[in-house]
Amino acid sequence: MYDVIIIGAGVSGCAIARELTRYDCTVCVVERDEDVCCGTSKANSAIVHAGFDAQPGTLMGKLNAEGNRLMYEWAKDLNFAVLPIGSLVVCVSDDDRPGLQALLERGEANGVPDLRIIERDELVELEPNISDNAVAALWAPTGGIVDPFGLTVALAENAAANGAEFRFNEQVSAVERVDGAWQVTAGGDKLLARAVINAAGVYADELHNRFVELSSGDDTLQQTMTVAAKPLSIVARKGEYYLLDTTAGQHVSHTVFMLPTAMGKGVLVSPTVHGNLIVGPTASDVDDKESTNTTPAGLAEVVSKSSLTVKNVPFREVITTFAGLRAHQEAHDFVIGEIEGAPGLFDCAAIESPGLTSAPAIGVMVSGLVADALKLSPKPEGVFDPTRPGVVNLVTTSFDEWDELCQQDPAFGHIICRCCRVSEAQIVDVIHRVPQPRSLDAIKRRTGATMGRCQGGFCSPKIMEILERELGMSPEEVTKRGPGSELVVGYNKDRIAAPDTDGEGGEA
């Protein structure tokens, strides 16, 4: 029996879990995948949006601005990478200037500080590779970039350190009312809770609609006055990206946006916190909520549209392409609150861009709603620890500091991932944290290993060996990203024909 069960271990679910552990309550996070950050949270633009795009008066507008402020504050306690590099929305025609002015006014209404429109001369000083057609831009100094893996993992580790439980590889198949509590069937187990939070990403509409059925089917449930109890429809909006090598990371110094359209913020060009250059995304609605493949047409669109704002993007330096899905709903606003007629069932749904930026504010808001509903008491002062130790980053570590680390642990001198300079000591460190990584992708999210130019071609076997050694796993148990992605399927010598000892021929 838990006080709260959170369904979904993306950035929103982990932020809510972290904030709920400030209260005297038991929290369980249930995730269908093998680790945190396996859905939308791992495949996005990695941008800290300033908050000028969302309509004033919406949850998006409010939580984007609050999340932007909290992101930089939380990074100090939780030790994840975030850089306030600022963002530019580029106007390539004088006819489009009213669009820039509208964004400026919208941002000011949302409380975004220090916004201003700059002219071409200043724009070129900031970005020498800006398009020759650029005439002006909206400058937002509070915009930034963040490591979405590091953010989500940091939230999860801090939540776990403060008492939250995480259950992975457990698909939720049912939610029912049992003896005054909510029973969640996940991975074959039946879990009870006083409150359940739906943070299921692109599948949040399916869970929401189950909640609505529960509320409409039980006349004894007290009516509430929050989110209307009506069906929710979420469309998976695909965005395709190019990721360029660190050799291209300085092509721009700020996040460069196009003027937004009805389909989103358009194709951006931006540095990443790891020193790469990211270009994308597209925006196309798809029926398949597992459709994370890239397409020739989508990638061609990224190339053509990025050239409208930034010239000479060095696409020869591409190291990978990827696609992510955003949880879009027609009203284009977050759906957050308690389900009408079903006290204890909460939505945190339709969290699309700027959902990553908004995550800290979402965590505060949802945890507050649940705490009020359950009448939770804050933990005594000093019991909740808001801090989380970071993972050593050898790319930013001086040689003197690195030498000192090697004196303490020689494994810091054993480089496993040469592209991203990740040592054995860093991998061993994260393996023994909670939630515990048990796959190559889980190690990647925590250390950056396999993310470089060779995309894991050289370091994957060594990481597999470390996982086997540290966790007592067999080679067959090590996966790339959980069950179904096993890397070892057999042994070469086992497949060699057995000698013909009985005259009937060896094995095939």
Image (tube, grey):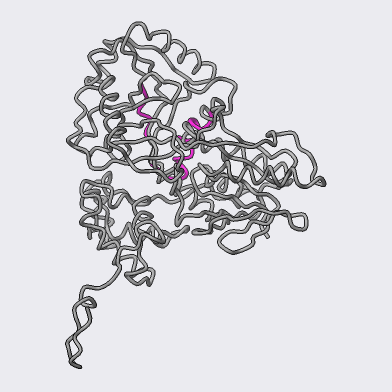
| Above or below: residue 487 compared with residue 291 | below
- The boundaries of the magenta stretch are 66-88
Can you name the residue that lies furthest to the top here?
95
**Left or right: 290, with 394 as reference point:** right
Can you name the residue that lies furthest to the front here?
504
What percent of the width, then of the height, locates residue 389? 43, 51
Which quadrant is the C terminus positioned in? bottom left
Question: Is 421 in front, or is 240?
Answer: 240
Q: Residue at x 60, y 21 (%)?
A: 57
Quadrant of the image occupied by residue 50: top left
Q: Residue at x 40, y 59 (%)?
A: 482
Reply yes or no: does residue 81 show up in magenta: yes
What percent of the width, then of the height, locates residue 321? 28, 40
Can you name the residue that lies furthest to the bottom here?
502
Count of numbered badges drawn on the protein = 0
What percent of the width, then of the height, locates residue 261? 42, 20
**Left or right: 6, with 273 as reference point:** right
Question: Is 446 in front, or is 288?
Answer: 288
What percent of the width, then of the height, locates residue 237? 44, 35
Quadrant of the image occupied by residue 296: top left
Which quadrant is the N terminus positioned in? bottom right
Can you name the residue that lies furthest to the right here?
220
Q: Residue at x 60, y 52 (%)?
A: 383
Question: Is 158 in front, or is 197?
Answer: 197
| Above or below: residue 285 compared with residue 429 | above
Reply yes or no: does residue 176 show up in magenta: no
Quadrant of the image occupied by residue 467: bottom left
Question: Is 356 in front, or is 99?
Answer: 99
